[in-house]
Image: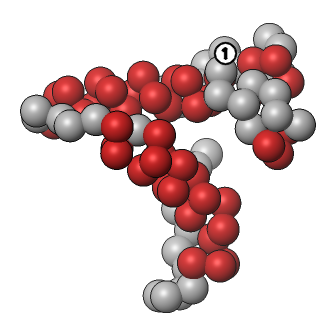
Amino acid sequence: NIEHERIPVKTPNMNAYIESFHAILEDECYSRNEFRDFAEAYQVIAEYMDYYNTRRRHSSINYMAPEEFYPGKLQGSLW
């Protein structure tokens, strides 16, 4: 049940959470890797997403990792 939501052009402030995530992804994943091909990019990004969604510390949850903040609740993730 994922719904695609569009925002008006040139209004990133209306979607601050995803804009912040994109900046983090750029800084912590894309800028630190040079991909040889799509398959390698897919693999590295999938590994980063697993790290981001389980082990990376997030300021929004008191600088805890999601697996610490939500123990036992991360099974069945999209990645």
Q: Is residue 68 left or right of residue 3?
A: right
Image quadrant assignment for residue 57: top right
**Residue at image point 52% right, 24% down:** 50
> Most extreme residue toward the front, as rendered?
32
Q: Which residue is mark 1?
A: 75
Q: Amino acid at mark 1?
A: Gln
Q: Position of residue 55 (x, y in %)?
A: 65, 21
> Most extreme residue toward the left, as rendered?
36
**Residue 37 versus residue 20 in the image, above or below:** above
Image quadrant assignment for residue 45: top left
Res. 2 visible in picture? yes
Q: Residues within 10 Å of mark 1 (few under 14, many from 20)?
A: few
**Residue at image point 75% right, 25% down:** 65
> In which quadrant will I find the N terminus?
top right
Q: Is residue 78 left or right of residue 34?
A: right
**Residue 74 versus residue 60 in the image, above or below:** above
Q: Nearer the viewer, residue 65 or 77?
A: 65
Res. 3 visible in picture? no
Q: Is residue 69 left or right of residue 32?
A: right
